[in-house]
Structures are given as structure tokens and as C-alpha cells.
Image (tube, helix red, strand yellow):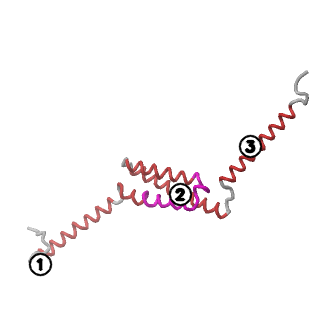
Amino acid sequence: MHFPTNPHAADPVDRRVAVAGARARSRGMVLAAALLAGCGPFGYLKKVAVDASRAVGQAEKAGAKEFAPYEYWGAVTYLEQSKVLMAYSEYDRAFDYGDRAKQLAEEAKRKAARRESGKMRETLEDKATQDEKNAAGKASAAGSVESKAKPAGGGDK
């Protein structure tokens, strides 16, 4: 039996067969495209290039560089490494690094929001100031211990 491929065939039966064949082929192509969408660079473009990059950008806008530097720079580093792995076609690892970048960026954004609202009071400047005060206190304490240890006369006789 011969199946024509022309959907404009004169015979109505031939036309129905041709249209059904065309529909089956188009469904097959749609199914193949849907299955391939989760593979390779297609998933990467959504997961990393869009989601993780957006999360890092939002964290930066929230002040994460200042208020949550560990999480922010971790997210930036994971995002960059994800892009490198993608360039080497290591899609699974690129996805994992992209996920981690997104997680860290979201954590940085949350921490930055808490610190800005006053729920977390310590900032980097506060920490540096406190460290300077502690160092100055230790230096003066060490100086007073040395002055107490030396005799006033200046040496042994």
C-alpha cells in the first residue's frame, strides 16, 4: 500500500493519511525536543546563566558585599567556576556549581537584609574596630607587664 506525503492530495483518504503522518512526525519532534531540553547546555542556560546570575546580582544589590562577604564571594566564585565547567562541557558539575552559587547568593541576600535591618548588628567595620581595640588593649597590657617586670634602677647590681 502506498501512503502519499502530500496533504493536498485529491483523494480524501490519502489526505487524512498524509495529515496523520505529518502530525505524528511533528509530535515526535516535539517529544525529542522536550527530552533533549534537560540535557546539555539548554538546562544550563536556565539554571546557571539566568537563575544563579540573577541571584548573585540581587545579593549584590542587597549589600551582600559588605554585610555577607563570605556567602557573596562564595556565590561569585561558584558561578564563575560553573561557567568554566560549562565551557568544558561538564554539564553535571556545572549544574551543581550553579546550584551552589544560587544557594550562597540567596543566603548572602538574607544575611545582608538581616544586618541592614539591625537584627544582626555586627558588620565588617565593627569587627575591624573591635579587633583594633583588642590589639591596642593587648599591646598596652603587654607594655604594663614589661614595666612592672623591670626594676626601677635599670638593671642588676
Q: Is residue 32 left or right of residue 138?
A: left
Q: Is residue 128 magenta?
A: no
Residue visible at 50% across and 52% down? 76
- Residue bearing the label numbered 1: 12
Q: Looking at this view, is 153 or 110 the one in front? A: 153
Q: Camera-side residue: 111 or 9? A: 111
Residue 68 sits in quarter:
bottom right
Q: Residue furthest front?
A: 154
Circle 3: residue type: Ala
The residue that disc 3 covers is 135
> Could you tell whether 16 is left or right of 83 in the image?
left
Where does label 2 land, which residue? 105
Magenta segment boundaries in residue numbering: 47-70
Secondary structure found at label 3: helix
Q: In percent of the image, x 17 and y 73: which residue is there? A: 19
Q: Which mark is residue 68?
A: none
